[in-house]
Image (cartoon, helix red, strand yellow):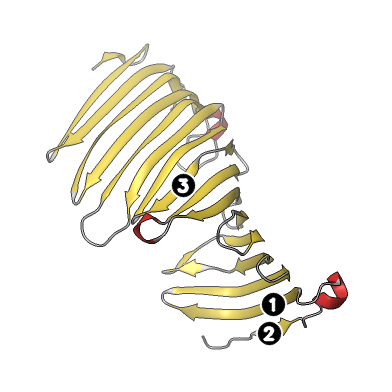
């Protein structure tokens, strides 16, 4: 970095006075860094606060990280605040909350979860049980609760992520291989009853758009081979001025180096098109 400023403050051990138990710990540390650059990324500011308290063998901690002015590869990223609270024994779960704000695009997001580790060696895994999550723009809000992410044996599994927004419902399940060499990835995304009128103002959505959209996509990748199918349907869809509503169904299937697409559209302006 062309310039870095780091400040550290560490509180003294004063558990004897605070708790009246010999050997208790009550400590706090803060780090303030400015204009960090390295590894293709940069941060205008990074502030970290850590507090640890308790008796030996029963310590608990709080941590808070605030990162602003983030960028990676020349692409601006949202400002992020992460807080974590829980025991430090490595056996019990830790409560985590992530808040992100993209000022340029007026997008905010919040995710709460509990994180726990289990098993040893090749059987070790990290489980993230999702609490509530929310993504909001000036036009639409998507919110949900529940689901889990499990990281084990170089594989990330996503299960039971469910949310609602723009009058519709979203479901997400999948697996991603994280190891070196050819990996397997796959997942299913399903959207039901999405109201186009509530998405007006988003990039790519016409100002006069209306109608309901539903769809389901299942994609599988093994090495470089990709297969899967996508099905999208629409009821009363209008995306052009003076156009009358259209009922449509689109399906696509990929596999063995081929892609097959089928279209069925019906309405006063298009007749029956297949």
How far is the residue under mark 2 from the one under mark 1?
7 Å
**Residue bearing the label numbered 2:** 7
- Which is nearer the N-term, disc 3 or disc 2? 2
Crowding at label 3, few (<14), some or many (≥20) Cα neighbours within 10 Å?
A: many
> With 100 as the anchor, is 158 left or right in this view?
left
Of residue 233 and residue 123, the one placed in the foreground of this image is: 123
- The answer to whether residue 212 is left or right of residue 176 is right
* Residue at image mark 1: 30
Residue at (52%, 62%) from the top-left corner?
77
10 Å neighbourhood of mark 2: few (<14), some, or many (≥20)?
Answer: few
Identify the image quadrant of residue 19.
bottom right
Label 1 crowding class (10 Å Cα cut-off): few <14, some 14-19, many 20+? some
- Considering the numbered disc 1 on the image, is that residue within a helix, a strand or a loop? strand
Q: Are marks 2 and 1 in contact (CB under 8 Å)?
A: yes
User: How far across and how far down the image is residue 111, in percent?
Assistant: 59, 49
- What x and y, as percent, mark residue 51? 71, 70
Q: According to the image, label 3 marks what residue? A: 149
CA separation in Å, label 1 and label 3:
30 Å
Q: Secondary structure at mark 2?
A: strand
Q: Earlier in the sequence, mark 1 or mark 3?
A: 1
């Amino acid at each position: 970095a062309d310039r870095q400023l780091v400040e550290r403050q560490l509180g003294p051990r004063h558990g004897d006075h605070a708790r009246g138990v010999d050997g208790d710990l009550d400590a706090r540390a803060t780090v303030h860094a400015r204009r960090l650059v390295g590894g293709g990324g940069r941060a205008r500011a990074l502030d970290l606060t850590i507090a640890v308290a308790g008796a030996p063998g029963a310590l608990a901690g709080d941590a808070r990280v605030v990162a602003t002015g983030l960028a990676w590869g020349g692409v601006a990223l949202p400002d992020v605040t992460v807080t974590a609270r829980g025991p430090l024994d490595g056996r019990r779960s830790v409560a985590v909350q992530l808040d992100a704000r993209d000022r340029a695009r007026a997008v905010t997001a919040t995710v709460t979860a509990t994180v726990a580790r289990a098993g040893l060696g090749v059987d070790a895994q990290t489980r993230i049980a999702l609490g509530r999550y929310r993504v909001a723009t000036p036009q639409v809000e998507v919110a949900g609760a529940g689901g889990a992410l499990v990281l084990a044996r170089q594989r990330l599994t996503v299960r039971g992520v469910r949310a609602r927004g723009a009058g519709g419902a979203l479901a997400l399940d999948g697996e991603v291989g994280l190891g070196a060499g050819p990996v397997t990835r796959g997942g299913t995304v399903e959207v039901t009853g999405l109201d186009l009128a509530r998405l007006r103002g988003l990039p790519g959505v016409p100002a006069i758009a209306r109608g309901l959209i539903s769809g389901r996509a299942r994609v599988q990748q093994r090495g470089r081979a990709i297969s899967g199918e996508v099905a999208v349907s629409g009821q009363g869809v209008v995306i052009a001025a003076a156009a009358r509503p259209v009922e449509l169904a689109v399906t696509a299937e990929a596999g063995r180096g081929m892609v097959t697409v089928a279209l069925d559209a019906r309405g006063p302006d298009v007749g029956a098109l297949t």
